[in-house]
Image (cartoon, helix red, strand yellow):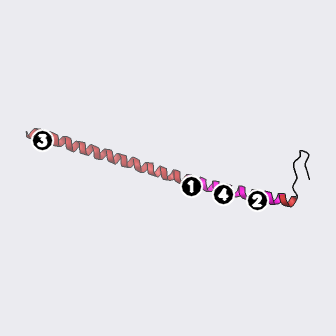
Amino acid sequence: MTRADGGTVCPNAVCENRFERLEQRVDKKSDQLDMQQEKIVRLEEKFDSLTHSLQGLTKALWGMSGAIVSVLLGFFIWYVQTL
C-alpha cells in the first residue's frame, strides 16, 4: 500500500505495535525526567543547607581570627609596658 506522497502505509497491527512501543518509550523517558527533577530539588535543598553551614563556619573563623589578633595585641602591649 502506498500513500499519495509516495510513502508506505503500514497495516493496523504493525502501526499499533509501533505506537505502543513509542508510547512506552515516551512514558519511560517521562518517568526518568520526573526522577531527575526530584533529584535536582533534593540537591538544591542540600546546597542551601551547605551554604548555611558555611556561613556559620565563616563567622566562627572571623571570630577566632579576631580573638587571636586581640590576644597578640594585648601581649604586645603588655610586653612593651614591662620593658
- Kind of residue sitting beneath label 1: Lys
**What element does badge 4 sit on?**
helix
Say which residue label 1 marks.
Answer: 39
Q: Residue at x 21, y 44 (%)?
A: 71
Q: Are marks 2 and 4 in contact (CB under 8 Å)?
A: no
> Real-space Cα distance between discs 2 and 1?
27 Å
Q: Earlier in the sequence, mark 4 or mark 3?
A: 4
- 31 on left or right of 42: right
Magenta highlight range: 15-40
Question: Which three-letter amino acid code belongs to the residue tagged 3?
Answer: Tyr
Compute the Cα span from label 4 to label 3.
Answer: 71 Å
| Helix, strand or loop for the magenta stretch, by majority | helix
| 53 on left or right of 25 | left
- Disc number placed over residue 21 in the picture, else none: 2
**Residues marked 4 and 1 touching at CB (< 8 Å):** no
**Residue 6 percent location from the top left of the image:** 89, 46
**Which residue is more in the foreground, 11 or 78?**
11
Residue kind at label 4, given as amino acid type = Asp
Q: Which residue is mark 4?
A: 31
Which residue is denoted by mark 3 in the rendering? 79
